[in-house]
Image (tube, rainbow, N blue to C red):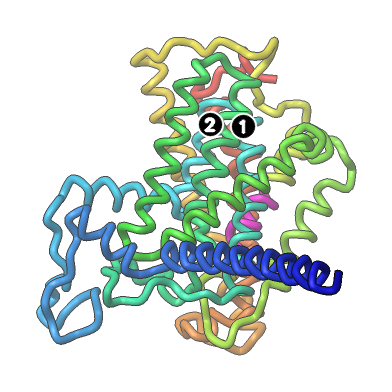
Amino acid sequence: MYIYFLTIITLESVKLTCERGMGWARKLKMWGFISYLNSPELVAGFQRCCGLVPRETRSNSNYKSASSQPLYEVRNWLFYFLFVTSATLGHEVFYITFLPCIHWNLDPFLCRRLVNVWAVVMYIGQVMKDILELPRPPSPPVVKLETRVDAEYGMPSTHAMAATAISFTLLLSAQERVKFPFELGLIVAVVLSALVCLSRLYTGMHSALDVICGVLISAVIMAVSYPYWGTIDYLQLHNPLSPVVGVVLPLFLSYKYPELDHYSTTRGDTTIILACCSGCSVGYWVNERLGLTFDLAGPFPVTLPPLTLVALGLSVARFLVGLGMLVLTRQTVRWASLRVLCRINGASVSDVDARRRKEIEVPYKFSTYVAIGLVNSILVSRVFVMMGLWDLGNSV
């Protein structure tokens, strides 16, 4: 009997040990796969497959040599132009021009929703970068085509987050407002977000793991917030405290951004994004109070008019006039706010290091881009009406 129980106990112990061993093996395999996705060699291999290879030099830098020749060789110019162009689709400058175009040429409702999602996704992504402090792929072996954000950390890729969030938020929101083939819209959303994601590998700025995590984080944020998009939109337009929250909360988050032991562009870029959202939020609330939101008139979904040469001409005119007003606003408010803040803090406007100090950088960028958001949401559309570039017949 003793031998029987001892045998049973031994067999169970062996079984448990094997199960634990298999569990550890699975964990080791998983960690190995994660390490593979985070490997710079994977990025360098993707670059080589796309025809981007480093030159043989003694320098470890992949930017410029003393003779101003790039220290990389492009063997496939189609991929080069495709991915370099796609990378610009994830920059803040692109969104600050693309999102107003949605307002001016399609539906301010869609612009409002996209700006909200963009701000939330980008803030979460930027903060995660500076909390996790995980580096970008090293060079060598990776070829790096961008230098501005190289001081930023890598995980997650905010380009991937923004591209995923903007593409699929526009797809999901537009189907409520306008008629279009959903399958075609889905293909466009997948292709555009995929191109931006792959461009981060091609430019050497992110590992595959950075990009995958960025896409997954955006997907989770959208899945969690999607049921509340309508409620948030209603409160943003009708709650009397909406303009207060719309200014105070983004400003607070900008000032309380995680501190680093070195300067990084993430705080300034995040402040710009939050400020744009703040200005647009207040502006759309004001439009609702004034009784003219410029939103499409129902019943929804509406059928868009055909794209004629006249409509295309009006669209181009709105873009040029609107962009000119935003650039003028940026230059004016930036010039004034920088000089006021530098005078208050006893700094020179030409001192780059002083302009990077939080007490100067945050308020001057916040005030500049709040003004841009206000001008875009309130003033530009009314100028279009006065110039005969906007037909109020299809707006409410």
Q: Is residue 291 visible?
A: yes
- What kind of residue is marked 1? Leu
Q: Position of residue 217 (x, y in %)?
A: 61, 53
**Residue at 61% across, 45% down:** 219
Q: How many marks?
A: 2
Q: CA distance from mark 1 to mark 2?
A: 11 Å
- Where is 396 relative to 359, above or below? above
Please indicate whether residue 382 sits to the left or right of residue 41 in the image.
right
Sequence-first disc among 1 and 2: 2
- The answer to whether residue 365 is visible is no
Residue drawn 50% across the image and 80% down it: 349
Which residue sits furthest front? 1
Q: What secondary structure is found at the residue carrying circle 2?
A: helix
Q: Main secondary structure of the magenta part?
A: helix
Label 1 vs label 2, nearer the camera: 1
The residue located at (14%, 59%) in the rendering is 74
Q: Is residue 95 left or right of residue 240?
A: left
201 displayed left or right of 242: left
Range of residues picked out in magenta: 271-279
Q: Residue at x 88, y 48 (%)?
A: 241
Q: Residue flagged by tag 2: what amino acid is it?
A: Trp
Residue at the disc numbered 1: 110
Query: On residue 104, which mark appears?
Result: 2
Residue 255 percent across, percent down from the top left: 71, 72
Residue 152 or 302: which is nearer the viewer?
A: 152
Q: Which is more toward the observer, 329 or 387?
A: 329
